[in-house]
Amino acid sequence: MAEDVINYADSKGINKFGVIGHSMGGKVAMTLAMLYPERMHGVVMIDAPPKDVNDDLVYVPIMKNAVTLSM
């Protein structure tokens, strides 16, 4: 799904963008940030933590750099 987002952005001539993802879309957003950090302005994830940060090493670099915002 992350590749689909990149292919769509490429087809529209969008070089850098931000994404918002909820649930499964949050995992797509994390994958985009990990694979294409140079293309991201920012990523917002809502209700989409990895199953276990310690076991899911794919997402560890993203989670270490994540910022939690609270109001």
Image (cartoon, rainbow, N blue to C red):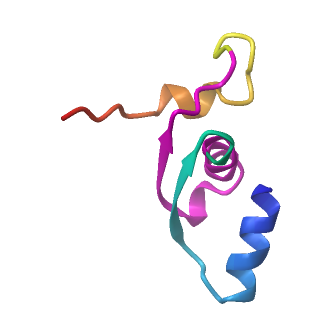
Rendered position, 67 above or below 2: above
Quarter of the rendering containing residue 23:
top right
| Residue positioned most to the left | 71
| Left or right: residue 44 compared with residue 23 | left
Query: Can you give x and y, in whole percent of width and height, for residue 51 in the image?
Result: 69, 19
* Quadrant (top left, top right, bottom left, bottom right) of the C terminus: top left
Rendered position, 71 above or below 8: above
Q: How many marks?
A: 0
Query: Can you give x and y, in whole percent of width and height, for residue 15 in the image?
Result: 60, 78
| Residue positioned most to the top | 54
Q: Which residues are magenta?
A: 26-51
Rendered position, 42 above or below 68: below
Residue at image position (56%, 50%) is: 21
* Quadrant (top left, top right, bottom left, bottom right) of the N terminus: bottom right
Residue at image position (74%, 77%) is: 8
Query: Can you give x and y, in whole percent of width and height, for residue 19 in the image?
Result: 53, 59
Is-magenta flag for residue 41? yes
Rendered position, 13 above or below 69: below
Depth check, front residue: 6 or 45: 45
Query: Can you give x and y, in whole percent of width and height, for residue 28 in the image?
Result: 69, 48
Residue at image position (50%, 25%) is: 64
Residue at image position (54%, 73%) is: 16
Is-magenta flag for residue 31? yes
| Left or right: residue 67 compared with residue 37 | left
